[in-house]
Image: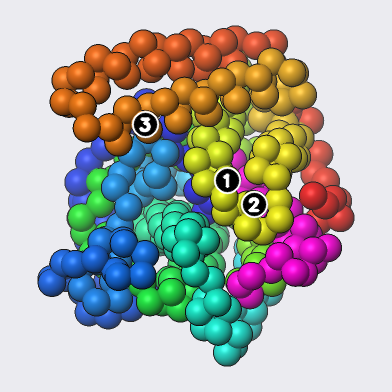
């Protein structure tokens, strides 16, 4: 699962880990090192806080950080129950199952000696931004693992086909998270994923919002990975670290996950065929796109280190993602409208102002007062984007060769 669902959390509930997360914890990808938060300190090389030697304190949660998600599992059971829904169209879902069983990437995520050596050569500010990139990516993938694993468990007797697909998707997400966490250890830091499972807040989304958000997240993840991969294939001197060589096959996992959610949405057309669906799909597109744009522009030095222009990369990913999801969603944002980018850039500037205020030495009450007009303007920009003339979608056709398109 990609890292771009967080803005939606403004409109969702947060909660502490439930019994669901406790069960999932047993199956969690194991962190580097033992569980528990002991001997806190600071990594001398990067300045990051550590729980203990070699284990990084997770980044503080805010509206832009990757989140852990939960949902109404009883409603999920009703949605997929073949007794309650005897006419549920399972044809495309059943076809998806075979794709996941094939496990095309079973032997893909195999490391070599180049990883540690490359990490040793990345120093200074570039080392810090690589660690941040790996942490955010690992957290997002692990979030997908937890959610999909529990959905697979809960739906096992209700709808075995759907349950098996969720379980196989959790396999993919666990593989990705483990690979990323091992990459973090190349930089002498890693995440305690078991500790995160127990202590991170969970954001609640109703099932249909889970479908919208995860579909978008998987598809935008596909376009991010394939675009970075293609760029670095054309510019090998900017490779810096071998994990990017894995992105071509890796992104196909994201694509398959997205296609499964396409099949789900087509099997439950009530999530796509009324005016409320148009508003919600447009809203989720906007929130995911804004989250990605703000996150990446906060860390533009990462993309510059890879020889990429952050804005060009972002707009390419947004255009292609929008075309993809527009085949399923009844309405999407018009990313080609010049107003779209203008307002995104305005929000980037405001986000920088908010960050500067947050890092200042002013009293907290003064910071809050200084932020208020900026936040009001930010919300105004969001509203203006939402009210832009949308693009009608929902043709249900699938691109035959999306990987041929390059950044």
Tell me which residue sits at (56%, 20%) in the image. 346
Report x, y in % for residue 371.
Answer: 32, 19
Q: Give the structural element (helix, strand or loop) at label 2.
A: helix
Look at the numbered discs 1 and 2 and tell me whether their residues touch, using CB distance below 8 Å.
yes
Q: In this rendering, is residue 209 above or below 249?
A: above
Task: Give the labeled residue for mark 2.
Answer: 304
Residue 226 among magenta residues: yes
In this rendering, the label closer to the viewer, 1 or 3: 3
Q: Please say if 80 is above or below 370.
A: below
Dot placed on the residue nearer the N-terminal end, 1 or 3: 1
Other residues around mark 3 within 10 Å, as few (<14) / some (14–19) / many (≥20): few
Give the distance between the C-alpha atoms of the residues marked 1 and 3, in whole angstroms.
Answer: 16 Å
Q: Residue at x 41, y 47 (%)?
A: 66
Q: Main secondary structure of the magenta part?
A: helix
Identity of the residue drawn at 42% across and 26% down: 353
Tag 3 residue: 356
Q: Is residue 77 left or right of residue 98?
A: left
Question: Which structural element holds mark 3?
Answer: helix
Instruction: For residue 30, say whether it is visible.
Output: no
Q: Are marks 2 and 3 in contact (CB under 8 Å)?
A: no
Identify the residue under disc 1: 300
Find out whether residue 343 is within the magenta segment. Answer: no
Residue beneath the point at 19% across and 67% down:
41
- Circle 1/circle 3 CB separation < 8 Å: no
Specify the segment rendered in magenta: 214-242
Q: Earlier in the sequence, mark 2 or mark 3?
A: 2
């Amino acid at each position: 699962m990609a890292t771009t669902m967080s803005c939606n959390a403004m409109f969702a509930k947060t909660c502490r880990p439930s019994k669901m997360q406790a069960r999932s914890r047993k199956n969690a990808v194991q962190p580097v090192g033992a569980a528990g938060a002991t001997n806190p300190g600071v990594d001398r090389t990067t300045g990051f806080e550590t729980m203990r030697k070699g284990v990084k304190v997770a980044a503080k949660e805010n509206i832009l950080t990757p989140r852990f998600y939960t949902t109404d599992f009883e409603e999920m059971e009703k949605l997929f129950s073949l007794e309650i829904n005897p006419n549920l169209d399972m044809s495309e879902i059943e076809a998806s199952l075979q794709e996941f069983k094939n496990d095309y990437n079973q032997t893909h995520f195999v490391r070599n000696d180049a990883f540690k050596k490359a990490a040793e050569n990345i120093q200074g500010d570039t080392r810090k931004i690589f660690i941040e990139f790996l942490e955010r990516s690992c957290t997002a993938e692990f979030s997908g693992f937890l959610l999909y694993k529990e959905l697979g468990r809960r739906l096992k007797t209700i709808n075995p086909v759907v349950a098996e697909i969720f379980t196989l998707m959790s396999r993919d997400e666990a593989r990705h998270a483990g690979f990323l966490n091992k990459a973090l250890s190349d930089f002498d830091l890693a995440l305690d994923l078991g500790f995160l499972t127990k202590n991170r807040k969970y954001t609640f989304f109703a099932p249909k919002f889970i479908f919208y958000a995860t579909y978008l997240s998987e598809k935008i993840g596909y376009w991010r990975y394939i675009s970075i991969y293609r760029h670095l294939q054309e510019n090998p001197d900017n490779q810096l670290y071998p994990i990017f060589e894995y992105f071509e096959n890796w992104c196909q996992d994201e694509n398959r996950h997205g296609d499964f959610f396409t099949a789900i949405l087509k099997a439950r057309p009530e999530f796509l065929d009324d005016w409320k669906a148009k508003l919600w799909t447009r809203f989720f597109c906007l929130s995911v796109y804004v989250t990605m744009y703000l996150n990446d522009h906060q860390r533009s030095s990462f993309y510059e280190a890879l020889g990429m222009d952050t804005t060009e990369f972002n707009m390419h990913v947004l255009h292609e993602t929008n075309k993809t999801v527009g085949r399923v969603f009844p309405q999407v944002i018009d990313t080609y409208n010049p107003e779209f980018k203008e307002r995104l850039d305005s929000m980037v500037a405001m986000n920088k102002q908010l960050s500067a205020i947050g890092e200042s030495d002013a009293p907290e009450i003064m910071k809050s007062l200084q932020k208020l007009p900026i936040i009001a303007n930010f919300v105004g920009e969001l509203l203006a984007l939402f009210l832009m003339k949308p693009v009608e979608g929902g043709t249900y056709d699938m691109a035959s060769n999306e990987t041929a398109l390059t950044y």
